[in-house]
Amino acid sequence: TQASVNTASAAGGITLTQTGGGALILTNTSTTAGAIDVAVSGADLVLDGNLIAGGANGVNLTTTGAGDVSLGGVIDATGDAVVLTAAGDIASAPGAGVVAGFLTAAAGGSVTLNGVNAATVAAGANDDLVVNLSSATAVSLPTLVVAGSGDVVLAQTGAGAFTASDAGSGA
């Protein structure tokens, strides 16, 4: 069966583990000063809202054995790292995005980070945006933005093709 976390908020970090084989659906999860770590074994992890790791803390979303990571909202880990690891695919819906200083996305299937907002994957002013991807199939990143004078650095280490349709900095 699937589990759903409608709203979780904490002053410290949040750690969620789903081992029952059902999908885990997160909606509007945030911390004021702590990291967010979510692991699902054998099923999908679905973000159906926003994740905010306050206080310059990171976000780790992981599926093991089987399961996709699906982003339907914005992950905000400003000043820290977002790590997305999926046994299956990693995909985001239009309007979803990631705001972080460092993004790592590793999937057994494809990685597709779509979005219609201008900062789908973004770094703060004058920060470098480093995106490390590992996918056996195609990788698509339509929009990468760095505000200020930072650099955009991309690496794809899987066998899949890589496509970036718009990448640049504000400098």
Image: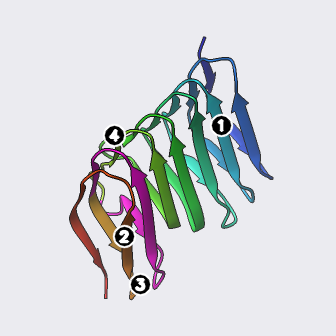
The residue labelled by disc 2 is 154
The amino acid beneath tag 2 is Leu
The amino acid beneath tag 1 is Ala
**Disc with the residue nearer the chain's start (2 vs 1):** 1
Q: Secondary structure under badge 1?
A: strand
Dividing the picture into quadrants, the one containing residue 170 is: bottom left
Question: Residue 152: image x %, image y %?
Answer: 36, 76
The residue labelled by disc 4 is 93
The residue labelled by disc 1 is 39
Question: Residue 33: image x %, image y %?
Answer: 75, 60
Pointer 2 local density, CA inside 10 Å: few below 14, some 14–19, many at least 20: some
* Residue at the farthest right position: 12
> Residue at coordinates 59% horizontally, 17% vertically from top-left?
22
Dividing the picture into quadrants, the one containing residue 168 is: bottom left
**Disc with the residue nearer the chain's start (4 vs 3):** 4
> Residue at coordinates 69% horizontally, 37% vertically from top-left?
8
> Residue at coordinates 33% horizontally, 40% vertically from top-left?
93
Question: Mark 1, mark 4: which one is toward the viewer?
Answer: 1
Question: Mark 1, mark 3: which one is toward the viewer?
Answer: 1
* Residue at the farthest left position: 165
**Disc with the residue nearer the chain's start (1 vs 4):** 1
Q: Give the range drawn in magenta.
A: 118-141
> Residue at coordinates 68% horizontally, 46% vertically from top-left?
37
Pointer 1 local density, CA inside 10 Å: few below 14, some 14–19, many at least 20: many
Tell me how many marks there are. Answer: 4
- What's the distance in space between the residues labelled 2 and 3, CA to CA? 13 Å
Quadrant in which the N terminus appears:
top right
The amino acid beneath tag 3 is Gly
